[in-house]
Amino acid sequence: MQEEKCNWFASWFDTPYYHILYKDRDYTEARAFMDTLTNYLNLPENAKILDLACGKGRHSIYLNELGYDVTGADLSENSIAAASKFSNEKLHFKVHDMREPFEEKFDAIFNLFTSFGYFENDEDNFTTLKAIHNSLSEYGFAVIDFMNVHYVLKNLVAEQTKTVEGIEFHIKKYLKDDHIVKEISFEHQGKTFNYTESVKALTLEDFEAMMEKAGIDLLDVFGDYKLHKFYKNESERLIMIFK
């Protein structure tokens, strides 16, 4: 499949500014979530895990430390180059378009931190879901950790400014054409930059419809990283486990 450099994620994720803006992500919470999730799924000791849309590999690296055979995949060549410095015989990274299934099969596939719904075309999102399903082993489980759209819209901050490493990021968020859009503008070294994130505002009902169409079994739905029950208007996350 031809790489679509015009897509927002193909450019934004490959810049150093993306990683600067989000450098304060909670690594302790991320690790605790991986502990909880792998325990819940009762994965075998040497399970093969795919971390799909892995970024610089923070989840992949920790899953490997837990003893799993991990492949981290992402469209961003720069992120994969950074993550690959941590490679070993049971930790591999590759540039990959999530719409394409893998030839090898995995015992678990994790798509974390709202790394779904990036495409303008609904069919591409459906294709991604099918690719995840088709990359599972016979007894494998897949997990999509997505935003809870209802919670996000209820708590949306329309405008904010965030200063990181001396860069003042101006952020605007809004709903447009069933997408939650984040506009990011800033100046650095005398240049002005403008980037956009756009994620399809997919609800649980939207995912259920796609899964039914694809012949996927949705097994469990949770509302936070401690795997508490999902509440439509209160839960911060929408975490779905399927096979």
Image (cartoon, rainbow, N blue to C red):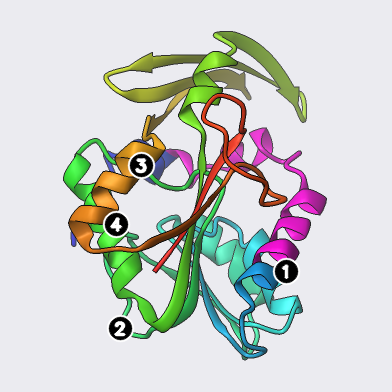
What amino acid is at disc 2?
Glu
Residue lying at 61% horizontally and 33% vertically, measured from the top left: 235
The reply to whether residue 3 is visible in this rendering is no
- Label 4 crowding class (10 Å Cα cut-off): few <14, some 14-19, many 20+? many
Residue 199 in percent (x, y) is at 39, 33
Question: Which corner quadrant holds the N terminus?
Answer: bottom left
Q: Which residues are drawn in magenta?
A: 12-37
- Label 1 crowding class (10 Å Cα cut-off): few <14, some 14-19, many 20+? some
Q: Is 46 above or below relative to 57?
A: below
Quadrant housing residue 161: top right
Q: Which residue is mark 4?
A: 128
What amino acid is at disc 1?
Tyr
Label 2 or label 3, whichever comes before in sequence order: 2
What amino acid is at disc 3?
Gly
Q: Main secondary structure of the magenta part?
A: helix
Label 3 or label 1, whichever comes before in sequence order: 1
Question: Exactly how many numbered labels are in the figure?
Answer: 4
What amino acid is at disc 4?
Thr
Label 4 or label 2, whichever comes before in sequence order: 2
Q: Which residue is mark 3?
A: 117
Query: From mark 3 to mark 4, how far is it between C-alphas?
Result: 9 Å
Residue lying at 76% horizontally and 59% vertically, measured from the top left: 31
Image marks 3 and 4: residues in contact by CB distance under 8 Å: no
Q: Is 96 above or below relative to 221?
A: below
